[in-house]
Amino acid sequence: MSSEPDTKVQAEFRESFGKGFARRLRAAGKIPAVIYGHGTDPVHVALPGHQVSLLIRRANAVLELDLDGKSQLTLVKDVQKDPVHQVIEHIDLLVVKKGEKVEIEVPIVVVGESAPGTIANLDNTTVTLQAEATHIPEHIEVDVEGLEDGTHITAADLKLPKGSVLIADAELLIVAISVPAATLAAEDEIAEADAEVAAEQSEAAEESASE
């Protein structure tokens, strides 16, 4: 992944800090970030805003930074956004090396349609895995095609890509197939109505027989 040109980012060292400087940096189309890990001192940098905003749409994005001509592979660990305007305020980057295994939260994506009349409830939207820093899966698919009411899919049931290892509890519930409560209520009402009709017919039959 690190060899792909669109993951290469030109970063700049920054020595000024504080909210005022950060605002000016963002106004100039750049994002404040800090690089840490592997026992090194934190390094404060500025990243090109538009390019990085596109790259980090992917969960667990790996960026190959160019810092004064030196290449540094980093994993996006945290993205801080303004809660109102959703503007990226700061990014935390973890130093990683090719071949190194990292622990990450990978999104779950449900595919397929469960049995008619049922719905697939996604109990956990992510699962914790260990994977090589340069081969992190974008997401894990869960196929629910044709699954019946009462079916449970746990973390142990997930089909993981080669090189990925499950860190989460194997019994963690990922997807549960069920019949919507509204459907059950409607079925109960129909059953009660049918029972009432049957009772009335039975009473009518008994009255007719006694005449």
Image (cartoon, rainbow, N blue to C red):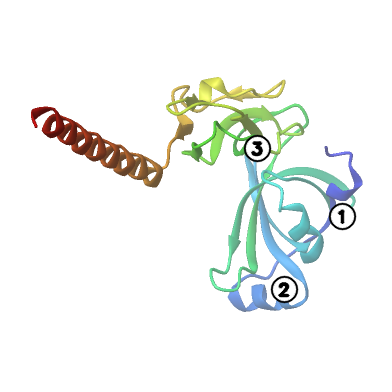
Mark 2 burial class by Cα count in 10 Å: few <14, some 14-19, many 20+: some
In the image shown, does 35 or 170 lie closer to the viewer? 170
Across and down, in percent, residue 148 comes to 50, 26
| Residue for point 71% across, 73% down | 26
The kind of residue tagged 3 is: His
Indicate the quadrant where residue 164 lies: top right
Indicate the quadrant where residue 197 lies: top left
In the image shown, does 155 or 9 lie closer to the viewer? 155
Across and down, in percent, residue 106 comes to 61, 37
The kind of residue tagged 2 is: Leu
Where's the C terminus, which quadrant? top left
Which residue, given by chain and number where applicable, does mark 1 sit on?
A: 68
Which residue, given by chain and number where applicable, does mark 2 sit on?
A: 25
Mark 1 burial class by Cα count in 10 Å: few <14, some 14-19, many 20+: few
Across and down, in percent, residue 186 comes to 36, 45
In the image shown, does 207 or 15 lie closer to the viewer? 207
- Drawn side of residue 162 relative to residue 37, left or right: right
Q: Which one is earlier in the sequence, the residue at label 1 or at label 3? A: 3
**Spatial separation of the CA atoms under disc 1 and disc 3:** 20 Å
Q: Which one is earlier in the sequence, the residue at label 2 or at label 1? A: 2
Q: Are marks 1 and 3 in contact (CB under 8 Å)?
A: no
Which residue, given by chain and number where applicable, does mark 3 sit on?
A: 38
In the image shown, does 105 or 210 lie closer to the viewer? 210
| Residue for point 24% across, 34% down | 198
**Spatial separation of the CA atoms under disc 2 and disc 3:** 27 Å
| Residue for point 64% across, 34% down | 112
**Spatial separation of the CA atoms under disc 2 and disc 1:** 19 Å
Q: Residue furthest left?
A: 210
| Residue for point 67% across, 45% down | 59
